[in-house]
Structures are given as C-alpha cells and as structure tokens.
Image (cartoon, rainbow, N blue to C red):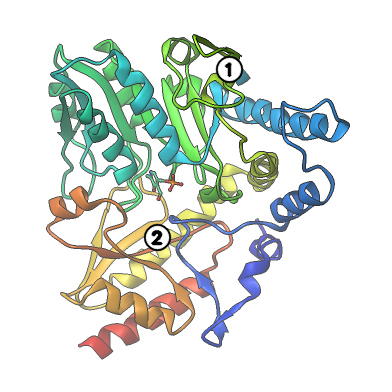
Amino acid sequence: MDVNKIRAQFPILERKVKGKDLIYLDNTATSQTPLRVIEAIQHMYTTTKANVHRGVSSISQEATDLQEATRRRVAQWLNASSEQEIVFTRGTTEAINLVASSLSDSFENGDEIILTTMEHHANIVPWQLIGRRKRITLRVVPINQRGELDLDIYRSLFTERTRLVAVCHVSNVLGTVNPVKEMIAIAHANGIPVLVDGAQAVPHIKVDVKDLDADFYAFSAHKMYGPTGVGVLYGKKRYLEMMPPYQGGGEMIANVSFEHTTFAELPFKFEAGTPDFVGIAALSKALDFIDEVGYEAIAAHEHKLLSYTTERMMQIPGMRIFGTSPDKSAVISFLIGNEHHYDIGMLLDTQGIAVRTGHHCAQPLMHALGIEGTVRASFAVYNTIEEADKFVATLERVASMLG
Ligand code: PLP
C-alpha cells in the first residue's frame, strides 16, 4: 500500500493549521473524504439533483437509480440477503433510535435490554427514552482492566425478561474489538436478537452480517470516508417487517386518507421524507475507495501505526493508556499523569495536531474508569509513521512543559 498515493486523494490533508501541516488524528469522530466522494456530490448537484421516487422526469429517475444502486451495493457489501434489509438513515444514532422506537412497541413493563459499559451515548439514551412509555431495565456487561467485556457476566445477564442485546462492535474510546459473533451466538441461544453498533467497525473491519448473524447492524458513512448525513441500518427482514414505521411522512406510505394509512414495502416504510439522496449516491464512492485499498491493507497499516505509536507513547513518564486489549483498533485514549485532557489537546492543536478530548459521548465508561475524560488519538489509512513521530515528539514536549 502506497500511503502517499492514498494521501493524494484527500485534499484536506494539504491544509495548514496554525501554520503547521495538519496532522489529523480524530478519525474516530469523523474521517476525511477522498476526492471521488467530493466529486460525486458535486457531480450530482450540478447534473442530477431531482427528488427521488417522485418524478416522471429523466433526472428524477437518474437520481433514484443512483440511490437504489447504492442500496444494492451496500447490501452486497454487508452480505445482506436483500436490499430490502438496507434502510438509509441520517447516521448510526438515527438507526439505533429507529430500532429502539419501533421494536419497543412489542416490549412490556419490566422487560430488560443488555448493553455494555463501553457503549456510546447513541446506544444508551435511545433505550432510556423507551422509559417514557414503558418501564425498561438496562443490564450492563462490565469490562476488565484491559477494557474487554466479561463474557461470563454477559451470559449470566439473560433472564426471561430480556428482549434485546445492543452492543458496539468496536469501542470508540478503548478501541476494543468485541467478540460480537460469539455474543450474538450466546444471545440467539437464549432466543434474543442483537443490535450491533458498527460505527467504529466498518472503517476498519470487513463486516459480513450473515456470518455474524446480526439481527441489526448500524453505521455512519462519515466515519468511513463517506459524506456526512448518511447512515445505514441493516435489519433482518423478519424483524423489519413486524416493526411499525419510525416516522410518518412522504415516501413511507402506500395509501393515505384521513381515516387510515397503509405503509410502503420495505425498506421505504422506514424512510419518511426526502432522504439525503446526494450523500447516499456518494457513499458508493467511499465503498469503492475502501474496496480499492482493501481491508487487509487498511488493517495492516493501521495496526502498524497503533503498535508503533503505543510503544513510543509508553516511554513518556506518567503516560496512562486506556484500552489495552490485544484485539484493538487504531484508537489510543490516554492521559498524562493528572493533567487535564483539554490542556493536552489544546497544546497539540498549536502544532496542527487534531485529536479529541473529553468523555467521547461515553460518560458511563468514564465513570467506570474513574476519570472525567481522555485525550483520544485515532488513525485512518492515510496517517503515516512520520505523523506518529511528530505526534509523540509533541506529546513529549507537552509532558515536560506540564511537568
Ligand atoms: N456509536 C459509536 C460507537 C460512535 O463512535 C458514534 C460516533 O462517534 C456513534 C455511535 C454515533 O454516530 P453518529 O453521530 O454518526 O450517528
């Protein structure tokens, strides 16, 4: 893999921040976008912007074809059984809210959902919102010292009231790659469906929903070199069919009268209103980019960056890294001594190095770790060893400055 050829496809990597070359290490929050995705958006706005599924006009038909071709592409890419199992959403958050809102129609007071300590708020709060209508208990799988889930406790959390397991494939803070295939098998042995939050997995790992046997799988395009405002919910047809619509409006209906409305077929039943059809069409270019580089090459490169940077960081006095599982994606959450994460992030920014600081939308995990927040550096396929060197050298200076 030629990282320079890859970097050349990302115009933003040429920019300066505070007079220095941008070193972008906030890929977990959002990744950068290759030119082909930007060009696809521009092309559609300049040639093919007409509302999908509504027009008899040629350009409306072309726009619809582009959107539906992406749906087929995503279905193949995930190894789904049919494109009817692919619902476009605004992102992972909306995908999880959709399932929480619709699936919970069949829940009853006292039912239970199993989550884990390392969930993003997007996979906690939607389940709590059900509580406005029904009394639901969240049962939480704890983590060990390395930031891995305790599967023995997970097994013990199933009761006759369990209705769903909702778990992230990869932690956005610890980087831990969870054994979701095994967790799904355990849930299914108990007769329980599983929703996987794949937001941090799809940029790094080839996902096959059939192999995992996931019942729902959610992710966001903007974290996988795609456009903002687009997400995917994969759902097994038998679940999507029995679930009521999430929102009402255009596109999701078959017939409307003031007395009664019937709903469209899958997946349109869940796609009320005009979708971000430009973003959806451009998502297929992000998939092209990933396929062209290849997951094996992406993983090899990112693991090299992860182990090299971790080893060098560990030489810095007072370095505390959170998440040390051997099965880890290229995310490094850390603190130096008791210094505030924000101060470290600000000092890195003065050198053009973009990281994230704070609780990373995972406050329950922060409580479990006994901290308020961390600094998080996360890598993508376009990052280099030279950038890792500059990052660590800056951290060394920051550490000695902060004493
Ligand atoms: N789940 C995880 C694990 C995440 O890391 C994120 C975003 O950081 C989300 C869900 C929410 O994604 P989005 O804001 O794109 O909906």
Residue 203 x %, y %? 52, 46
Quadrant in the picture for the N terminus:
bottom right
Q: Which residue is mark 2?
A: 307
Residue for point 44% across, 55% down: 28
**Residue 359 locus on image (x, y percent):** 26, 59
For the point 67% across and 30% down, the residue is 73
Residue drawn 23% across the image and 48% down it: 147
Instruction: Look at the numbered discs 1 and 2 and tell me whether their residues touch, using CB distance below 8 Å.
Output: no
Q: Element at badge 1? A: strand
222 in relation to 123, above or below: below
Where is residue 191? Give x, y as percent.
Answer: 28, 10
Q: Is residue 95 left or right of residue 184?
A: right
Q: Amino acid at mark 1?
A: Ile
The answer to whether 169 appears left or right of 389 in the picture is left
> Which element is circle 2 on?
helix
Of residues 74 and 153, which is closer to you in this image?
A: 74
Q: Nearer the viewer, residue 199 or 58?
A: 58
